[in-house]
Image (cartoon, grey):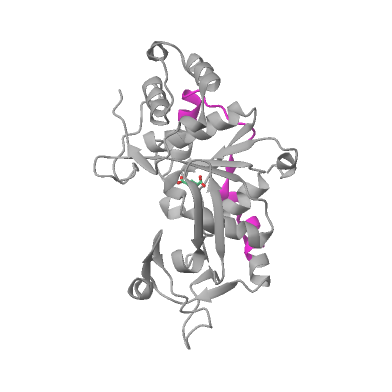
Amino acid sequence: MITAAFAKEGKYRGRFAPSPTGPLHFGSLVAAVGSFLEARTHGGEWLVRIEDLDPPRIAPGTEDLILRTLEACGMGWNGAVAHQSARRDAYHGALHRLREKGLVYPCACSRREIADSAVAGVDGPVYPGTCRAGLPPAKIARALRLDTRGARVAFDDALQGHIAHDLEKDFGDFVLLRADDVYAYQLAVVVDDAEQGITDVVRGADLLGSTPRQIYLQQRLGLPRPRYAHLPVAVNAAGEKLSKQTLAAPFDAKKPLPALIAALSFLGQQPPRELSRGTVGELWNWAIGNWRLDRVPRAASLPAPAYT
Ligand code: GLU
């Protein structure tokens, strides 16, 4: 992996970090387009990282499909594609550093127990800290959690504004290593963004609730904080985020222009009609010359457009 030296030079480095759980659909294309254009218009690099950390959720063949789709869309990335599945040692090292600081504790609660005792938070149930003072007798540790007592995080998102959270109250002590021995997304992303020297995270606003947890982990691990811009998320008529579960149609990689033009419009840019009769290269020439982050709607979600 590339080291953080790049970030120290003050050069922009962004990334697109898909989970290979299904083919790219309009929702993930929006995150790819937004992060790509921010990187390219800053003369920066754009990295692709495959977040294949969670074996049961990986759909075989989708990584290749995602990469071929990005290529068909004319979105070339810098350097080699990174894989979270190859990074367990780095996550282990970070977890160890947090343990040494006394911030990690084993938790024996089952899903059922948590569901019964948790209250609703900003981004799912808030674990009430049951095992913080030690495991109940005869209980076996299942997961490792981060102690969030006293953790207050505030940041300014380029699109979603000022965000401030009390982590214990809003999210609770979150999992770092799951019962099935899988490192949690929050930990992996923080370790990878730092090691890859990511200066700017541009991604969907469905992850806005993850950012305070990630910033807190950066603070505790002594890692630099990237800038953040959370793009509106494309939702269907029922207001649900487009995903494999909501049956978002993967787009036709042989005919990428309509989806790319729709993604630019969705992001508040005004692509001229003629682009639909041109080439992918012409589309990016226009988009890189005209992209403006300040035209992106400052909304957490927007209806997905119809396009063909
Ligand atoms: N892998 C995450 C996803 O596909 C994105 C992670 C990120 O951009 O931080 O939703």
Toward the viewer: 102 or 208?
A: 208
Locate residue 241, reporting x and y percent. Answer: 34, 44
Q: Quadrant of the N terminus?
A: top right
Toward the viewer: 252 or 118?
A: 118
Which residue is at a point 54% across and 22% down the rendered structure image? 288
Answer whether residue 150 is magenta in the image: no
Q: Residue furthest left?
A: 238
Which residue is at a point 56% across and 32% down the rendered structure image? 38
Which residue is at a point 47% across and 24% down the rendered structure image? 73
Locate residue 167, reporting x and y percent. Answer: 50, 64
Q: Is residue 20 above or below residue 30?
A: below
Q: Quadrant of the C terminus?
A: top left
Q: Is 189 situated left or right of 264 in this image?
A: right
Can see residue 166?
A: yes
Answer whether residue 78 is magenta in the image: yes
Boundaries of the magenta span: 67-95
Q: Is residue 120 above or below residue 24?
A: below
Q: Is residue 262 above or below residue 47?
A: above
Locate residue 214, reporting x and y percent. Answer: 56, 56
